[in-house]
Amino acid sequence: MPWNDEFWDREEVMDRKDLEEIQFKRLKQTIKKAYENVGFFRKRLKSVNLTPDDIRSFDDFAKVPFTTKEHFAENYPFGLIAVPLSEIVRIHTSSGTSGKPKVVAYTAKDIENWTNLVARCFYMVGIRRGDVFQNMANYAFFTGGLGIHLGAERVGAVTIPAGVGNTERQVQYMVDFGTTAIHSTPSYALHVKEVAEEMGLIDKLKLRIGCFGAEPWSENTRKRLEDAFGINAYDSYGLSEMNGPGVAFECKEKQGLHIWVDNYFVEIVDPKTGERVGEGEKGELVLTPLTKEAMPLLRYKTGDITILENEKCGCGRTHPRLMRIFGRSDDMLIVRGVNVFPSQVEHVLMQIPEVGDNFQILLTRKGALDEMTVKVEVKDEFFTGEIEDLKRLQQKIQRALQLELMLRTNVELVEKGRIERSMGKAKRVIDLRSI
Ligand code: DLL
């Protein structure tokens, strides 16, 4: 296979009509594969009196029942696999419900296809042969390790399997190897930035590009990372059930993430009713992989809340865009009846110059009332010990949060380093209300 410029460009600007044709053909194949090879899907289709032949349009497909993460628990470990184990070459897991991890499996062709999808994302943001790409993600069961790694190698970058942790060594390598591109969770990137500043090496870095994903983050965090590292920072979305990273990715316009609809069929539904929402409306992302051999999931409810944008992008690519993920429907906090996404809190805090890079939300109950306390690290230069200054800052943060959330919160200011750093996905919320 010639992995040259022409190869990647051709896939990104396919005609919309051709894309739809490919989608429908692949969708039919996926339904058939699932029906014929996975008892679970056969039963699900039969429960609504459907056979694969009854699905003749994208609208008909809406009659197929959803697959949820609970179904992963029920079919643990291998119940959703559509090929014999002898054809499986890799397994990853990610945290699931009722103590059972979600197990996802790949054939050799799945790995090949996934690698090309991740490479397509990296090519899009300008990562090329000669770039030094440091992958600061966990290489164990997490798909952000190997999945990202193979995609970066495929575009020809010098790929460093750095993993997470040992942050001082990571920063030293970035300087020594002349790293030009990094990948990590945004929360770990903030920690790397902090350590690079402490080591006095932040100005010695040669970074151009940062790819960040696997958890929600905000425009203001983007700005912090871009300013500190002198990079362009891009949002990367994916989930293990759909291979892992490489499902959707921002282009240089940074106006939403192109979702590769030749490989994933996209629906946005009302999370409660399951009905498809109107164009441009916010809802839950439901995905059906169109090319997976090992695990052809039908209408998988991701839990992720977003908007699908069909307008053509300034970059010329024809694949539609997902707007930045607001959060998961199950991450949404209800505090005294008000809906709050942790990403909204992040958005507010990261635009306040005195605020450091870490925060945590603590939920407690006082009598019948919920209390939300936001613990905020303050940058060293503002943590002066002057009570009056701190009081003013605390009130400023409280007002900014109230304006965004329509909710009164307590704000507790702490010194830098007082909140535990995350190496992978950050734990932003501690909910003590049910204890
Ligand atoms: O997080 C795959 C991945 C690895 C994506 C590296 C990007 C980079 P899981 O561990 O299965 O897979 O978690 C998937 O993480 O359903 C979202 O809730 C969340 N998530 C992933 N990317 C983003 C993002 C990987 N860019 C779950 N913004 C998903 C917000 C994200 N949330």
Image: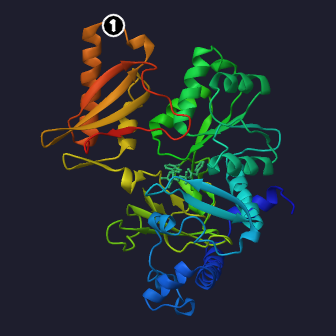
177 left or right of 255 in image? right
The extreme left residue here reads 367
Quarter of the picture containing the N terminus is: bottom right
In the image, 12 versus 95, the foreground residue is: 95
Task: Tell me the quarter of the image containing the C terminus.
Answer: top left
x, y percent for residue 162:
71, 35
Q: Nearer the viewer, residue 212 or 429?
A: 429
**Residue 194 lies in what quarter of the image?**
top right
> Relative to 157, is 21 on the left or the right?
left
x%, y% of residue 217? 47, 42
Tag 1 secondary structure: loop
* Residue at x-position 29% and y-position 24%: 412
Name the foreground residue: 431 vs 290.
431
Q: Establish if 222 lies above or below 296.
A: above
Identify which residue, 194 or 330, lies in the foreground.
Answer: 330
Can residue 259 be seen here? The reply is no
Residue 347 is left or right of residue 150, and the answer is: left
What residue is at 36 percent from the left and 74 percent from the top?
275
- Which residue in the protein does label 1 denote? 385
Q: Tell whether circle 1 marks a residue whose Cβ is less than 8 angstroms from ligand 1.
A: no
The reply, left or right, for residue 373 in relation to residue 247 is: left
Q: Tag 1: residue type?
A: Gly
| Residue 324 spot, x, y in % from top left | 47, 51
> Horizontal and vertical percent for residue 138?
63, 41
Q: Is residue 302 visible?
A: yes
